[in-house]
Amino acid sequence: MLEYNDKIRAAAKRLLKEGVVDMVIGFKKGTMPMMNEPCLIKRPEDADTLVWDANCGINLANYIVGRKEKIGIVAKGCDSRNIVTHITENKIERDQLYIIGIPCRGMIDKTAVTNLCEGEITSVVCESDTVKVAGNDFEKKIPVSDVMQANCSVCIHRNPVIYDELAGEEVVEQTDVDRYADVEKIDSMSTEEKWNYFEDMFSACIRCYACKNACPLCYCPTCFVDEAKPQWVGKSQDKIDIRTFHFLRAYHCAGRCTDCGACERACPVGIKMKTLTKKMEKDCFDMYGWEAGLSLDQRPPLDTFKPDDPEAFIK
Amino acid sequence: MKVTKIEKHGFEKGLNKIRKDFTLFAPVDCGEYHEFKEIENGEKPDLEAVNTHLSPKSAIYPQSQPMFNYTLDENEPDHHIMKEVKPDLSPRAIFGIRPCDAKSFLIVRRNFDTEEYKDPYWIEPYEAATFVGMACSAPCSTCFCTTAGCGPFNEEGLDLLLIDAETCYYAKAITDKGEKLLESAGWLTWVDEPSIDKEIEDLKTAAENRIESKVSTDRLADIETNDLYNASIWEDVSFACINCGTCTYVCPTCWCFDIQDENCGSCGIRMRNWDSCMFPLFTKHGTGHNPRETKIHRVRQRFMHKLKYYVDKYDAGIQCVGCGRCIRSCPVNIDIRNICELMNNHKQEACAS
Ligand code: SF4
Ligand code: SF4
Ligand code: SF4
Ligand code: SF4
């Protein structure tokens, strides 16, 4: 995906010079291997700091909520779907945005790469289907498919669904993927097994809220976890409060989550909390044939009514 | 120098002996990363772990800590009385702690132990603990301790320093507490040879030379506070930040907390929980006014506190030991080394800007 750099930079320069946008939101190279930093470019001469590679898993749609300026934004498939969701939810106007679409080939999971290597990693370069990793005393080539972010390996919307220009040729969408194998595995567990599974999953949570804050959907001015009057959920390390936070957040994302994976990527302790939103995503698909953020013309299933709603009580 | 030599094959036996007199806290490999935790039966410390994912601060200062409890149940003798919950003060050994983390407790102490206020919930467990350091011979690429007032063999805050000399460990006793722990472990092969002192000195120099990452802090104290506060850097610095509390929760030197009351039925507790200046509720006033309404305010608070207010208030360096945890854990790669550089290089801006 390195070849996108020139196109992104040229577009950013042009847009800023011509005054089409006031700023461009993209990524700049990070200070650590497998890390890039979201950045804001305001001057055409700074556009050369923009980069694109397989470490751009943070969802940039998170950075446009409530902004008043005209914004150029670099967006891969899932980011573009979250932009659509923002427009549908009146968080930003379509006219305010100039979308530089990125046909995406998936992001790499830095924890997976780290776990496959002994010793500290000093450089990681992702080429078409191999990841070249180097450390102080080792070098290694890993097939991209072994270390791809879990959501990317089952993604069927890699091309942006909305854009003003593309940074490259559209990629072929994956078709033979089993999108919900992980959810089905949990669905098939007994109640007790499920309980233990989630108890174990959330036991390491430190409630830093990186998951919720990395999520473009979590834009409420005051999140329910921060409400004091009434206080919906306690603030300690109490297990029930931790679970309450996770379950409620997942419900707030129902029918909106695009499975972009920013939440899991952000978690400092490797919790797979996306399992919960994925279940919501699957239910919305099974019940309403709905996938979030694919089109500006459809209302999300949870804020509309259709006569063929599967729930009997509503009729 | 008071040094004992510990053969590696006898090491585990000594550790088991210590456990009779001390509760042991040490780094443990839990699959994806290392955790610093209480060692339970059958668990093995992993002393090779360089920086545990979360700092060891929770061994003294847990994330959630009960301070008082009460009951309204009139069948209980002491109903309707707020009772102090004493923290666990049994002797504990904080074993295999890295020198930067040990030093961090001295920084945090400045907050909890002052002329005016003494916080028993922090001071008492701290004083009940023995800190057994593990010198770092292979620091990480993100370690910048040597320019953050610390170092891979730094002894401040330690009672004992272990040095891995390949075939054996040397244990350097720094305080009486350290010596007591050596006795308890039966590690009493005292060595008093200049050649060993030199060996340790050489290992130290080699380790220090391995640290490539650095920060400059020399100008921080002289820069005018308001000028730095109003500098134009903050919008850029904070842009990527998602205001999670990760950087402050993983940091050994962050000390902020929030007090909460929780009740259930007829009893309840008053507890304190870690807080973070990255959170929207941090220091929000009862009136609803929030002195740090936006993320620019919050990010600026974090860096100004660590690298300016602390520097000015205590004249004892920065509120950071250079462990690099915040750099590794920040989901959007906000790097304190870069920001420290920007702050340290800050020149007064023209009034017009
Ligand atoms: S990011 Fe991870 S540790 Fe932080 S609140 Fe979310 S699940 Fe918990
Ligand atoms: S500010 Fe960062 S580098 Fe410094 S002590 Fe805290 S976590 Fe470590
Ligand atoms: S940096 Fe923030 S959380 Fe850390 S001690 Fe300072 S004010 Fe508290
Ligand atoms: S860890 Fe990074 S994103 Fe999270 S609050 Fe700290 S600086 Fe911001």
Image (tube, coloured by chain):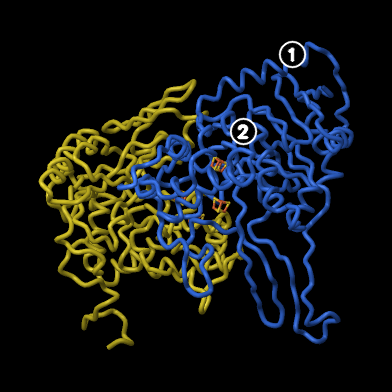
Looking at the image, which residue is at 24% across and 59% down? A83
Q: Is residue A99 left or right of residue B333?
A: left
Image quarter of residue B33? top right
The answer, for residue B259, to whether it is visible in the render is yes
Q: Amino acid at mark 1?
A: Lys
Q: Nearer the viewer, residue A286 or B173?
A: B173
- In the rendering, what colour is chain A? yellow
For disc 1, the marked residue is: B198
The percent position of residue B134, horizontal first and vertical second, equals 70, 31
Q: Is residue A217 left or right of residue B106?
A: left
Q: Count the labels in the image.
A: 2
For disc 2, the marked residue is: B149
* Secondary structure found at label 1: helix
Q: Earlier in the sequence, mark 2 or mark 1?
A: 2
* Quadrant of image for the N terminus of chain A: top left
Q: Is residue A185 left or right of residue B45?
A: left
- In the rendering, what colour is chain B? blue
Image quarter of residue B135? top right
Q: Nearer the viewer, residue B304 or B164?
A: B304
